[in-house]
Image (tube, rainbow, N blue to C red):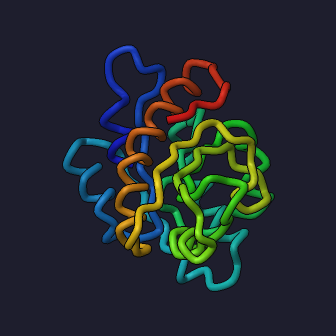
């Protein structure tokens, strides 16, 4: 999130309107407040298993900002088709694997267990299917001898912070051809 916001300067077609989290203690919330960016926190726990009610609360919090694009970054909640559909083609996500490989969780451990020679991250448009939307960009990193899920994750994170801002900059300007780093 921070890498995205810090890149939204100068001739960038987008600006951060609001930072939303389901965790009031998220570092991004404190950083956004410190930098004068509006924040909204919608704790998912009071909603229990009622995902549509949680998403309705998110939607209500977003409505006053009249957003054009939503960028998910570290938002570890599966969104329903009811929430995703109105944002189809305008909601981006970053995932720590070279999609379509390793949708879901524990991607670094799964890449290591499979003996992959490379790993990476993907920015994609969000669809109702988990980690399955059209790919807007990918960055690759080599899997090195002795890698652990943590060491691999650290190298992938560096590329995430390069890839996502590059993709958002192009996407906000109307360019959807995939970027490769």
Residue at image position (40%, 75%) is 148
Of 110 and 78, the residue lying toward us: 110
- Say which residue appears at 56% left-offset and 34% top-offset: 180
Q: Is 105 drawn above or below residue 68 in the view shown?
A: below
Residue at the location (53% across, 82% down)?
45
Horizontal and vertical percent position of residue 120:
52, 53
Total numbered labels: 0
Between 88 and 153, the one nearer to me in the picture: 153
Residue found 35% across the figure and 61% down from its top: 154
Q: Quadrant of residue 66?
A: top right
Residue situated furthest top in the rendering: 11
Left/right placement of residue 133 relative to residue 170 reads: right
Q: Position of residue 60 (x, y in %)?
A: 59, 54
Residue 116 is situated, as x and y percent measured from the top left of the image, at 59, 64
Q: Which picture quadrant has residue 4?
A: top left
Front in this rendered view, residue 56 or 137: 137
**Left or right: where 174 falls relative to 89:** left
Spot occupied by residue 106 in the image (x, y as percentages of width and height): 55, 75
Q: Residue furthest left?
A: 34
């Amino acid at each position: 999130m921070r890498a995205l916001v810090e890149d939204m300067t100068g001739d960038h077609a987008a600006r951060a309107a609001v930072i939303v989290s389901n965790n009031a203690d998220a570092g991004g919330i404190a950083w956004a407040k410190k930098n004068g960016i509006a924040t909204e926190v919608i704790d998912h726990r009071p909603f229990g298993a009622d995902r549509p009610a949680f998403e309705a609360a998110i939607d209500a919090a977003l409505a006053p900002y009249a957003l054009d694009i939503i960028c998910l970054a570290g938002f570890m909640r599966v969104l329903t088709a009811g929430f995703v559909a109105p944002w189809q083609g305008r909601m981006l996500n970053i995932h720590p694997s070279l999609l379509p490989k390793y949708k879901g969780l524990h991607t670094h451990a799964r890449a290591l267990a499979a003996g992959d020679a490379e790993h990476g991250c993907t920015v994609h448009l969000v669809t109702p299917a988990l980690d399955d939307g059209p790919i807007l960009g990918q960055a690759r990193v080599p899997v090195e001898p002795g890698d652990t899920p943590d060491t691999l994750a650290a190298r992938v994170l560096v590329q995430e912070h390069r890839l996502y801002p590059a993709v958002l900059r192009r996407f906000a300007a109307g360019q959807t051809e995939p970027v490769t780093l």
